Image (tube, rainbow, N blue to C red):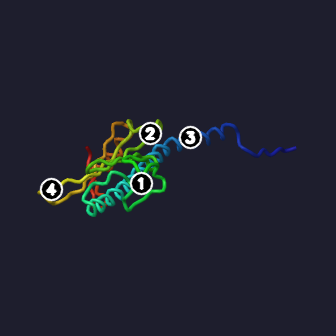
Amino acid sequence: MNHIKSGFTLIELLAVVLIIAILTSVAMPQYRRSVQRAEAIEALTNLRAIFDSAKRYRAANSEDPLKLNGLDVSFFDADTPNSSSFNIGKFHYTFSANNISACRIDGNNSYSNTYCFRMYYVFDSGTKRKDLLTCSSNSEKYKWLCEALSDSKLGSLYVIGS
């Protein structure tokens, strides 16, 4: 009587698992970098919207805004819009005199080992205003992000390292 064996041997299954593990180990770092870059672009988009709204507020009221409330932009997930600092998603935003910063919050609810963006304006040649954006990181994990954005043009805004 002939027995036809169907199925896979243990060696074949192990080979497939090994191939999947190798492909995953190659793909996961790229996936994480893509997610980190997407988070950074989201923060830059929010920061730009807040900064542009702050410029309009400044033009209408002749003073710098110190909180999110009162601006013509709103975010449904801003935790304390009546304060000079608030969280939106994974970023902590802070108003200062002529700048707004956004720092990524890490798993410990701090931003000491992550990266920050800061938008501010300076006056060139006396009266011509120039908007600038800096990216800084005190963590080796995120330095690549600031370097990737460094000296690139995002809309009408130049990203410069600090």
Q: Secondary structure at mark 1?
A: helix
Q: How far across and how far down the image is residue 149, in percent?
A: 32, 50
Please say if 133 is above or below 12.
Answer: below
Tell me the mark number nearer the camera, choosing from 3 and 1. Answer: 1
Q: How far across and how far down the image is residue 43, in percent?
A: 39, 52
Q: Secondary structure at mark 4?
A: strand
Please report the residue visible at 27 percent of the width from the left and 59 percent of the height from the top: 58
Q: How far across and how far down the image is residue 105, in percent?
A: 43, 42
Q: Amino acid at mark 2?
A: Asp
- Tell me which numbered mark, 2 or 1, is placed earlier along the sequence: 1
Query: Which residue bears the numbered disc 4?
Result: 124
**Do the CB atoms of the residues marked 2 and 3 lie less than 8 Å apart?**
no
Dividing the picture into quarters, in which one does residue 2 lie? Answer: top right
Query: Which residue bears the numbered disc 3?
Result: 21
Q: Amino acid at mark 4?
A: Asp
Q: CA distance from mark 4 to mark 1?
A: 29 Å
